[in-house]
Image (tube, rainbow, N blue to C red):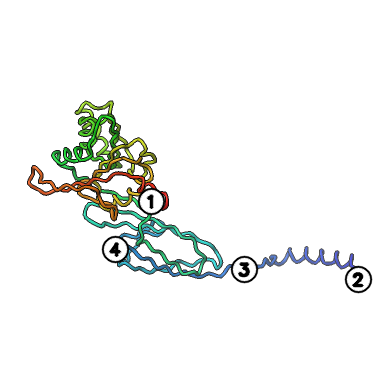
Amino acid sequence: MLTAAAVGLAGNAGRARAQAQVPAQVPEEKKPAAVKSAIKVTLPQDDAELLIEDKPTKATGKSREFITPQLDVGGKYEYKFSAKWRPNNYTVITRNKTLTFKAGDEIVVDLTKDDSNDKAVIRYVPTPDDIVKKMIELAKVGKDDVVFEPGCGDARITVAAVKAGAKKGVGIDLDPERVAESKETVKKAGVEGKVEIRLGDALDIKDFSDATVVFLYMGNEFDMLIRPILWKQLKVGTRIVSHRFVMGDWKPEKTLQIKGDDGDDYEIHLWTITKEVKDKAEKK
């Protein structure tokens, strides 16, 4: 009978001989089981463009279904969904949503609900100069006013407001061509010292606190996106004047119907920030 020490030595010698003749057997690692997840996406419009993880999809319709590639059972995954659509011929809205899920879970994505992070790109259409004048009159622009114009286009409203007496004007546009055009308008009007033109998304403005008047001509969808920002950031007494477009259930306190010099009919609307509006914003 061999002692434990002898067995150990014999075993080592045997392994050494075996290695010289036969490759060592290494057990394969057990691969995790794989499973797929079903995805159901609901979109605002039949023709909305949908991207998943920044990759375009080809399906159409308001409700679309997909299957993921094979995923590791029990693994956690994160997918980004992006929808882009045109509610009208001058507006493009982009909405993003990111979901975390476990492999095998059913993924339900609702992209029909408004989101505070939505982005809107508006096709530029200038307001006629005679309507600009009426907007400034409706806002009662005076020497103590600071005027903001989100989506300023060529800055004609901002410049006209400053020339009408406002002490400062700020125009914001995300199109570099419009910004260049705005700066040229400011230069030609000789109001460089009173007007600031910014390149950027008007929905990303962090501070409207200096504004006493805000001019808008950006579409109903954009107005609803910027409304909560204005409610929270503007001071009580600040006036908002919009060419044509409104703000949902926040009814304007005054609306003017105007026959333009070009013979077309126009509407302009006035709102004023009140304490009640500020209180409502705080509750949201």
Camera-side residue: 257 or 186?
257
- Dividing the picture into quarters, in which one does residue 180 lie? top left
Q: What is the CA distance from the residue labelled 1 to the residue labelled 4? A: 31 Å
> Measured from the top left, where is residue 181 in percent x and y?
23, 35
Label of residue 30 in the image: 3
Q: Which residue is mark 2?
A: 2
129, above or below 85, in the image: above
Label 4: how many Cα within 10 Å (few below 14, some 14–19, many 20+) = some
Side of 233 where 69 appears, left or right:
right
Q: Which residue is mark 1?
A: 280
Side of 108 where 139 appears, left or right:
left
Identify the residue at horizontal 56%, vertical 66% (top origin): 74
**Circle 4: element type:** loop
Identify the residue at horizontal 23%, vertical 50% (top origin): 245
Label of residue 45 in the image: 4
Circle 3: residue type: Lys
> Measured from the top left, where is residue 174 in percent x and y?
30, 42
Side of 130 where 11 appears, left or right:
right
Query: Is the residue under label 3 in contact with that under label 2 (CB below 8 Å)?
Result: no
**Circle 2: element type:** loop
Identify the residue at horizontal 34%, vertical 60% (top origin): 50
Q: What is the CA distance from the residue labelled 2 to the residue labelled 3? A: 37 Å
